[in-house]
């Protein structure tokens, strides 16, 4: 990694609240968490919606919790990430053109 990339990452990490960098950071966080949950295989636990047990040996409360967690992160990934990235782009462009 070069120094410029590290400087940009550090600036993004220390972005002000409700800035373009903050929105990008939140979107990247949601992407990373969803990717971890998806790769961990929690998608199969959404079968609780149809009443089908994902793992017969597990309690239904635990299956419902894991399935609900996956669904919440899925909807955040599908709905919030694009909105956050669009808001960051719009905010960046308006601040850039206003200067």
Image: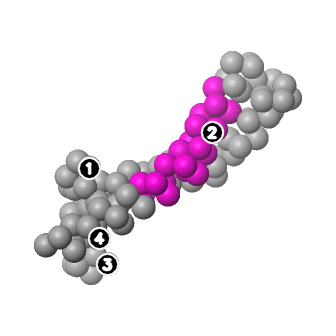
Q: Looking at the image, is mark 1 or mark 4 earlier in the sequence?
A: 1
Q: Looking at the image, is mark 3 or mark 4 earlier in the sequence?
A: 3
State whether residue 43 is above or below residue 3. above
Q: How is the image coloured?
A: one colour
Q: Are marks 3 and 4 in contact (CB under 8 Å)?
A: no
Magenta-drawn segment: 65-85
Q: Looking at the image, is mark 3 or mark 1 earlier in the sequence?
A: 3
- In 3D space, how far apart are the residues under numbered discs 1 and 4 (Cα atoms)? 15 Å
The residue at 29%/62% (across/down) is 91
- In 3D space, how far apart are the residues under numbered discs 4 and 2 (Cα atoms)? 34 Å
* Residue 93 in picture, x, y percent from top left: 29, 70
Disc number at residue 93?
Answer: 4
**Front label number (3 vs 1):** 1
Residue highlighted by disc 1: 18
* Residue 26 in picture, x, y percent from top left: 38, 51
The residue at 59%/44% (across/down) is 75
Disc number at residue 1?
Answer: 3
Q: In screen coordinates, is 35 left or right of 51?
A: left
Disc number at residue 70?
Answer: 2
The residue at 69%/18% (across/down) is 61
């Amino acid at each position: 990694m070069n120094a410029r990339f590290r400087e940009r990452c550090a600036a993004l990490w220390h972005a002000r609240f409700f800035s373009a960098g903050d929105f990008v950071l939140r979107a990247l966080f949601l992407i990373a968490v969803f990717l971890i949950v998806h790769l961990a295989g929690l998608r199969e636990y959404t079968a609780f919606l149809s009443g089908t047990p994902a793992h017969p040996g597990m309690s239904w409360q635990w299956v419902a919790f894991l399935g609900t967690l996956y669904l919440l992160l899925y909807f955040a990934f599908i709905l919030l990430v694009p909105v956050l990235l669009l808001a960051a782009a719009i905010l960046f462009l308006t601040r850039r053109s206003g200067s």
